Amino acid sequence: MAIVNRFQSELLLFRGSLPRSDDASLPNAPSADNIPLLFHPFTIKDLTIPNRIVVAPMCMYSSLDGFFTNFHLASIGSFAINGAGLIQEASAVLPNGRITPECAGLWDDAQVFKLKEVVDFVHVQGGKVSIQLAHAGRKYPESAFWPEDMSAPSGGAHLQWDKHHRVPREWSLVRSNRSLMPLRTDHYGGSLENRARFLLKVVKAMRANFPAEKPIFLRVSASDLVEEIAKWARDADVDVLHVSSGGNASQQKILTSPGYQVPFAEQIKRAVPGLAVVAVGIILHGPLEEEVLKSEKADLVAAGRTCLRHPNFALNAARELNVKAAFSQQYSRGRTIHN
Ligand SMILES: Cc1cc2nc3c(=O)[nH]c(=O)nc-3n(C[C@H](O)[C@H](O)[C@H](O)COP(=O)(O)O)c2cc1C
């Protein structure tokens, strides 16, 4: 059986021309005018995402020596089969930058092969995939296997996450200065410029080593970063800001409700023209995603736990918004029993 690229077929369907053969019998196929924004493609540099639905990065603690496994193929693959536009996956940049020994990593060329298998699968299904380069910092659990090298941007007993985590050793390069952490006075602490220095160094190093035509997404915690830093990130050629919040201190009590982080995304989107924005945080259904996009609070909308609960979140969103999203070719019979 020939495998049809869902992205190609989706474009055909959404252009209102030449619907896929298995879509031809469907009533009310959308024309370009009445397609919900959520199902419009999104292009940034040379990347075109077939719709605005993003699966937020979620470490799955299912790697072996940092290698992606069949679990990742099945998990990420199921999001792709079920219509997610962009799937983001976390990966540690160093063995001792993992939260647990089971976290995925990307510090050895050999790790690329399994990763490529996953990426190729997503592409065949018409989706896109991106990798989150991550470092656990001081979120080392007590059981970490590399106690002799537990480093983080800031160190010391006062920065221990909680009693189940080890006391981090400070990176000699940098100490950060965040709202819930003690102030410092070197050129990585104090003023906003100083506190943004390390972040922008990383962004610039990435940009210098990554093709200019490919977009860089930056995930920020909006409760301790401000629009000014978003502007600097844009000027350093970050293309998309993925706006989360909090999570930097165990004593934080974050009040959550559907869409609770959307106002942060909106604030940054309004303040920083030219920077695309992803909103995330208890986005439970398609109509909420559509509302966020329609009111121009964000350009893309990400869901994390909802996708764990409903890997077919994108197809559900399509049904809720009364649009016929293209199915994976292999699953296309599934739509013959209802819309
Ligand atoms: C199991 C799990 C693992 C996560 N791992 C990461 C991660 O590796 N990197 C990250 O930036 N966020 C991570 N997150 C946070 C999510 O990306 C997301 O921001 C958060 O869950 C809020 O979105 P939600 O309400 O849609 O779940 C994780 C969340 C969950 C539930």
Image (spheres, grey):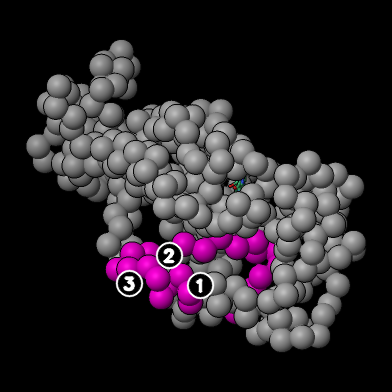
Label 2, secondary structure: give it: loop
Q: Which residue is mark 2?
A: 216
- At a point 32% along the width and 68% down the height, the residue shown is 211
Q: Amino acid at mark 2?
A: Ile
Residue 118 at x, y percent in the picture:
37, 39
Do the numbered discs 2 and 1 sit on residues whose CB atoms are within 8 Å? Answer: yes
Q: Which residue is mark 3?
A: 212
- At a point 14% along the width and 34% down the height, the residue shown is 19
Residue 27 visible within the image:
no
Q: How many numbered discs, if any?
A: 3
Q: Which mark is residue 203?
A: 1
For the residue carrying disc 1, how many other residues have a C-alpha within 10 Å: few (<14), some (14-19), or many (20+)? many
Residue 203 at x, y percent in the picture:
51, 72
Label 3, secondary structure: give it: loop
Task: Tell me the magenta residue range.
Answer: 203-228
Q: Residue furthest top?
A: 337
N-terminal of the pair, mark 3 or mark 1, is 1
Residue 18 colored in magenta in the image = no
For the residue carrying disc 3, how many other residues have a C-alpha within 10 Å: few (<14), some (14-19), or many (20+)? few
Q: Amino acid at mark 3?
A: Ala
